[in-house]
Image: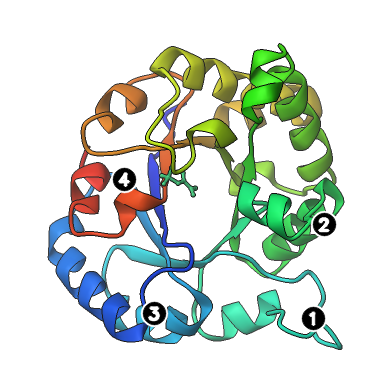
Amino acid sequence: MSRRPIIAGNWKMNKDINEAATLINELKPLVEGAEAEVVFCPPYVDLVEAVKLTEGTNIGIGAQNMHYETSGAFTGEIAGEMLTAIGVKYVVIGHSERREYYNETDEAVNKKAVKALELGLTPIVCCGETLEEREGGKAEAKVVGQIKEGCKNIDDISKVVIAYEPIWAIGTGKTASKEEADEACGWVRKTIEEMYGKDAAEAVRVQYGGSVKPANVAELMAMPNIDGALVGGASLTADFAKIVKF
Ligand code: PEP
């Protein structure tokens, strides 16, 4: 089965509304006609403008997080319904920074993923091991455990995008080798097969994330288990178009 590549930029806490508009306007013509599905994930306060600026283009807009409840006393949180109401189509769930700094658990990741799908949002569910876990031979167990818990009870797993992001490669400039990245994306696919069957595993898209840049994206994308990239730092300039059009 051929899976359409998906390249997503996670802007993290970067770009105010004016900077976001500038970058989107720069990138729009540069990513036009890309073979890959293209996603920009700016900060919440930029989302309305980002959706407006990308209407009628091949760029989809995603949020970097959401709450699984519809409304209520959750100060500082944003509901999935609020995202769909403004035309957001994707949502990053369980990024390692959210797991590390905001104690996001696999249980919360799972509730968010289930809710996102119910709302018609495409969840980009993140997983990945620390350097200590990799060096201790525990990388596979960590990734498999995160997928088993974070991606359970899902009606149609083919609508989920999974991002394998080794924590030691995020924002460090240290990319996993293409073989390491492919092997780990293979662990994800094998786990999905065990949970949902072979067809589902063939259909689900698995991104690699961790210091992806124009110079390394093509070799990563050539690997059989890698269907895209989740990109942090290198998604913040017009050079992101070189990754999108790998
Ligand atoms: C990320 O934050 O998801 C990421 C992969 O960051 P970077 O590309 O900067 O390593």
- Report, in whole angstroms, how far the alpha carbon at label 2 lies from the one at label 1: 14 Å
Q: Amino acid at mark 3?
A: Val
Q: Are marks 1 and 3 in contact (CB under 8 Å)?
A: no
Expressed as whole percent of the image width and height from the top left, the position of residue 201 reads 63, 27
Read off the residue under disc 2: 108
Marker disc for residue 36? 4
| Drawn side of residue 32 relative to residue 204, left or right | left
| Drawn side of residue 9 relative to residue 31, left or right | right
Picture residue at 15% right of the left edge, 69% below the top? 26
Tally of numbered discs: 4
Ranked by sequence position, the earlier of labels 1 and 3 is: 3
- Report, in whole angstroms, how far the alpha carbon at label 4 lies from the one at label 1: 32 Å
For residue 126, above or below residue 208:
below
Q: Are marks 4 and 2 in contact (CB under 8 Å)?
A: no
Q: Where is residue 73, by image quadrant?
A: bottom right
Q: Amino acid at mark 2?
A: Ala
For residue 13, above or below residue 93:
below
Nearer-the-camera pick, 201 or 132: 132
Ranked by sequence position, the earlier of labels 4 and 2 is: 4
- Report, in whole angstroms, how far the alpha carbon at label 2 lies from the one at label 3: 27 Å
